[in-house]
Image: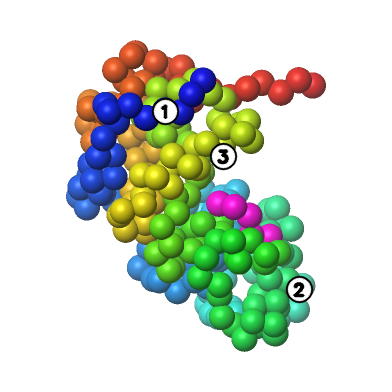
Amino acid sequence: MDFVQGEEIQGVASLLLRWFDQHGRKLPWRDTHQPYQIWIAEVILQQTRIEQGIGYYYRFLDRFPNVESLAAATEDEVLKYWEGLGYYSRARNLHAAGKTLHHDMKGIFPENHQELLKLKGIGPYTARAISSFAFGEPVGVLDGNVLRVVSRVLGTEAPINKPQNRTKFQQVVDSWVADYPSRDFNHAMMDLGATLCTPTKPGCMVCPLIGVCQAYQKGLTGRIPVKEKKLK
């Protein structure tokens, strides 16, 4: 399955950004360009629904408002403020990375995703999210919502959970965002997947990308995205 974008796929970013200007979600971590706050939000939301995560986000930042306060805390205290979120390795990695940032990097976040990847617990998605949302690095972010949007727009049945395909999806999104504000573009992609381009019963008739969506044109929306079943 190829990832070639034909002439029919044009202007994805401009269509998306016009829609986002009217329909983007208002979320507290979108009011800041501070990498620390964005980082905390992204880590909390890795395994947590937004509705639940908002309260934890405010509570955590109230106690640890910056890298210095996070680094100065004990691991037990950080874990205490993480209670109820589960997946406690996230909190341990957060604390370890906070100490690295404070002691070795003078509290200054790297501004590109490649350098951010060197911090403990920060993977490809989180690194790109921080670099895009805080610093405007022209890279796309890939979460489940974005993968669904991209695979449907391309009309590809290439399994989204195969590493080599994920690399290709990343290249596609990076090409779409290249000439546009990455912060708004990535927020828009995530919002479209969360609110309209949903796994079941997608709102195709009000989707800003209906005119370029190959899955819709070919009647494949119900089959895409494809996940390869793992053998037990």
Looking at the image, is 203 positioned above or below residue 176?
A: above
Q: Quick one: SS at disc 1?
A: loop
Kindly identify which residue carries mark 3: 167
Residue for point 52% across, 65% down: 112
Residue for point 33% across, 22% down: 214
Q: Earlier in the sequence, mark 1 or mark 2?
A: 1
State which region is magenta.
Answer: 121-125
Looking at the image, is 219 positioned above or below residue 171?
A: above
Query: Where the C terminus falls, by quadrant?
Result: top right
Front position among marks 1 and 2: 1
Give 56 or 219, whichever is nearer the viewer.
219
Residue 143 place in picture, x, y as percent: 51, 44
- Place residue 213 in its image quadrant: top left
Q: Earlier in the sequence, mark 2 or mark 3?
A: 2
Residue 92 place in picture, x, y as percent: 73, 65
Give 153 or 77, whichever is nearer the viewer.
153
Three-letter amino acid code at the position of disc 1? Val
Q: Quick one: SS at disc 3?
A: helix
Kindly identify which residue carries mark 1: 4
Question: Separation of disc 2 and disc 3 at Cα?
Answer: 35 Å
Taking the image as shown, residue 81 lies to the left or right of residue 56, namely right
Q: Earlier in the sequence, mark 1 or mark 3?
A: 1
Assess disc 2: are there few (<14), some (14-19) or many (≥20) residues with their C-alpha within 10 Å of its C-alpha.
some
Q: Quick one: SS at disc 2?
A: helix
Kindly identify which residue carries mark 2: 75
Residue for point 60% across, 65% down: 116
Three-letter amino acid code at the position of disc 2? Glu
Magenta span main SS: loop
Front position among marks 1 and 3: 1
Residue for point 66% across, 21% down: 229
Residue 215 place in picture, x, y as percent: 36, 21
What count of labels does the image hold? 3
